[in-house]
Amino acid sequence: MYQSNEVRGASKTSVVELAPVAKHLISKRELAAILGVSERTIENWLAEKRIPRLQLSARLQRFSLPKVLNALGRYEIREVGARR
């Protein structure tokens, strides 16, 4: 973000430091480490369309952890006949 300061008729432009933005998108390697699976498993899930991804370019894809966890939650098998 830029901030313009007028000094005696001349304009100066200075860069304003922004607070670091929390990292919302993660790489395939980071996702695999968080989930405790291999990168190949992530690739298999992508091929099966089990998890969503954000394709930023031909070689760059990122993942939103909450969306991935939500998608994987649909594949959770609950115990049948379990008492509550």
Image: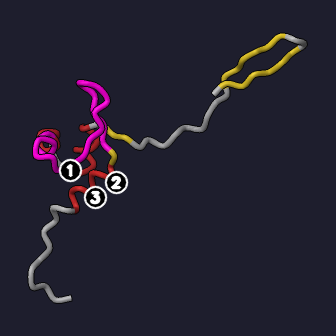
Q: In this view, does 9 lie to the left or right of 82?
A: right
Residue 25: percent from left, percent from top: 37, 41
Q: What residue type is labelled 2?
A: Pro
In the rendered image, residue 58 lying in the magenta stretch gets the answer yes
Disc 2 is placed on an element classified as helix
Task: Using the image, determine if residue 80 lies above or below residue 14.
Answer: below
Q: Which class describes the residues within 10 Å of circle 1: few (<14), some (14-19), or many (20+)?
A: few
Mark 3 touches mark 2? (CB < 8 Å): yes
Residue at the disc numbered 3: 70
Residue 23: percent from left, percent from top: 43, 41
Return the mark for residue 66: 2
Q: Which amino acid does label 1 sit on?
A: Gly
Report the residue at 79% width, 14% height from top.
Answer: 11
Towards the viewer: 83 or 6:
6
The mark nearer the N terminus, 3 or 1, is: 1
Mark 3 touches mark 1? (CB < 8 Å): no
Q: Give the range drawn in magenta.
A: 43-63
Q: What residue type is labelled 3?
A: Asn
Q: In which quarter of the image is residue 7?
A: top right
Tell me the quarter of the image containing the N terminus. top right
Mark 1 touches mark 2? (CB < 8 Å): no
In the rendered image, residue 25 lying in the magenta stretch gets the answer no
Mark 3 or 1, closer to the camera: 3
Disc 1 is placed on an element classified as loop
Residues at marks 1 and 2, CA–CA distance in whole angstroms? 16 Å
Report the residue at 33% width, 40% height from top.
Answer: 26
Residue at the disc numbered 1: 36
Q: Which class describes the residues within 10 Å of circle 3: few (<14), some (14-19), or many (20+)?
A: few
Report the residue at 28% width, 33% height from top.
Answer: 55
